[in-house]
């Protein structure tokens, strides 16, 4: 009887002494009845799991990974028995990983000798930042005739803005140059009214022409839609849209493409409506006649089709916007090197008037043009473009 009373307390005492609370799990005393009569045996106490060792060496965790600057990680738990570890391995991003660069892209530099206009061909921006005309002079090094012509232009003009080299470069330059000047114009709302009256006259002629169903499912609805977008844009500029916002809008693919399609449409309407007059003009300049509808299908409608003199005369006449065009190439006429210039001035009637002349230095005086809202103080047209073997650009007077 005496032994039965004493033995249980000894077992309980030994069980408490051999338990290891820091191990996170029982060290074997709970699952086994064990040696109840060996009170002095220390065997159960040393039992331990590998996870209950002192803090693990920093070399044990698997290396962390860092992907694309996003801070993604690999196996952050490290090796060993994670369930038994009270403290997880420290998580860190390697400090040797450089941060992602946020520096802005450098602006495009126009280089005529590279045969590119507007940011490296059709993949570049639709229109670039304005740059000093001296860049054209430097870029034409090794081409003495074009370089000298650029030097002549640099006496009149301070900057140029190149267009992307594609079929719409003329239309894009014409539109952007006009809108830039519209924003600076006194009485710009009156100019918007005049402009939209010209568009309304073209609409009347547009409805008189026949249009293939494959080209227009609903010609009148399309014309009204793009005219509405165009009117909204010119009104925004007249009401104070700043140059930066205008630039951003001009880079938008969908809206700018629809407005450029309107300019092509106005050009086609003008040529097809007054086919006989443009044929006479073409036969005088090129000694050939055109079929207006076929010409427009091949050279006006496609967005990849660049312009010739016919379109350059038709669009200013359709919108009533005078145009000054400076042409630079490698040809030389008899006498000194000169820059060929053309002024295309809208007038009443089907055709605009054109005046051709040459400049050899700043002392040369261009022909006197009529005064008006769309002319500079020296009676130069507000829309001034440069045509060269490198494409189309807008010119800015000194």
Image: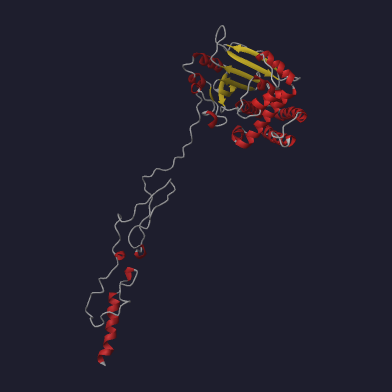
- Residue 241 visible in the shown view: no
Q: How was the colour assigned to the protein in this rendering? A: secondary structure
In the rendered image, which quarter is residue 155 located in? top right
Please provide percent x and percent y for residue 197: 75, 28
Q: Residue at x 32, y 61 (%)?
A: 80
Asked if residue 37 can be seen in this view, the reply is yes
Q: Is residue 29 above or below residue 333?
A: below
Q: Position of residue 115 (x, y in %)?
A: 51, 23
- Residue furthest to the top in view is 335
Residue in the picture at 44% in, 40% down: 101
Quadrant placement of the N terminus: bottom left
Instruction: Report the number of numbered marks.
Output: 0
Residue 379 rendering spot, x and y as whole percentages: 67, 17
Residue 327: image x %, image y %? 59, 17
Q: Quadrant of residue 9?
A: bottom left
Between 287 and 103, the residue placed more toward the observer is 287
Residue extending farthest to the bottom is 1
Quarter of the picture containing the C terminus is top right
* Above or below: residue 199 compared with residue 91: above
């Amino acid at each position: 009887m005496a032994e039965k009373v004493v033995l249980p307390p000894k077992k309980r005492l030994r069980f408490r002494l051999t338990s290891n609370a820091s191990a996170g799990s029982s060290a074997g005393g709970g699952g086994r009845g064990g040696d109840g009569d060996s009170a002095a045996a220390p065997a159960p106490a040393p039992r331990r799991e590998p996870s209950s060792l002192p803090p693990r060496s920093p070399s044990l965790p698997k290396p962390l990974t860092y992907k694309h600057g996003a801070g993604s990680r690999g196996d952050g738990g490290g090796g060993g028995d994670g369930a038994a570890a009270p403290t997880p391995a420290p998580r860190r991003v390697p400090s040797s990983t450089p941060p992602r660069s946020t520096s802005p892209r450098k602006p495009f530099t126009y280089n005529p000798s590279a045969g590119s206009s507007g940011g490296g061909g059709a993949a570049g921006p639709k229109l670039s930042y304005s740059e000093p005309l001296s860049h054209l002079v430097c870029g034409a090094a090794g081409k003495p005739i074009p370089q000298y012509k650029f030097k002549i232009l640099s006496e009149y003009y301070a900057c140029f803005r190149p267009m992307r080299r594609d079929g719409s470069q003329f239309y894009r330059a014409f539109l952007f140059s006009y809108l830039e000047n519209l924003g600076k114009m006194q009485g710009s709302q009156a100019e918007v009214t005049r402009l939209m009256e010209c568009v309304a006259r073209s609409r009347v002629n547009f409805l008189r022409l026949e249009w293939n169903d494959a080209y227009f499912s609903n010609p009148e609805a399309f014309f009204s839609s793009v005219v509405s977008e165009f009117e909204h844009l010119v009104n925004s500029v007249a009401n104070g849209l700043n140059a930066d916002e205008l630039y951003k809008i001009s880079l938008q693919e969908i809206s700018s493409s629809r407005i450029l399609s309107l300019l092509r449409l106005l050009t086609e309407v003008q040529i097809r409506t007054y086919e006989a007059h443009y044929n006479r003009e073409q036969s005088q300049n090129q000694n050939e006649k055109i079929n207006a509808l076929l010409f427009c299908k091949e050279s006006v409608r496609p967005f990849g089709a660049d312009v010739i003199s016919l379109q350059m005369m038709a669009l200013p006449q359709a919108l009533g916007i005078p145009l000054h065009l400076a042409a630079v190439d490698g040809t030389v006429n008899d006498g000194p090197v000169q820059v060929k210039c053309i002024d295309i001035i809208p007038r009443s009637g089907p055709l605009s008037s054109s005046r051709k002349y040459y400049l050899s230095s700043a002392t040369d005086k261009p022909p006197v043009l009529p005064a008006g809202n769309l002319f500079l103080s020296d009676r130069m047209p507000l829309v001034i473009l440069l045509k060269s073997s490198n494409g189309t650009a807008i010119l800015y007077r000194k």
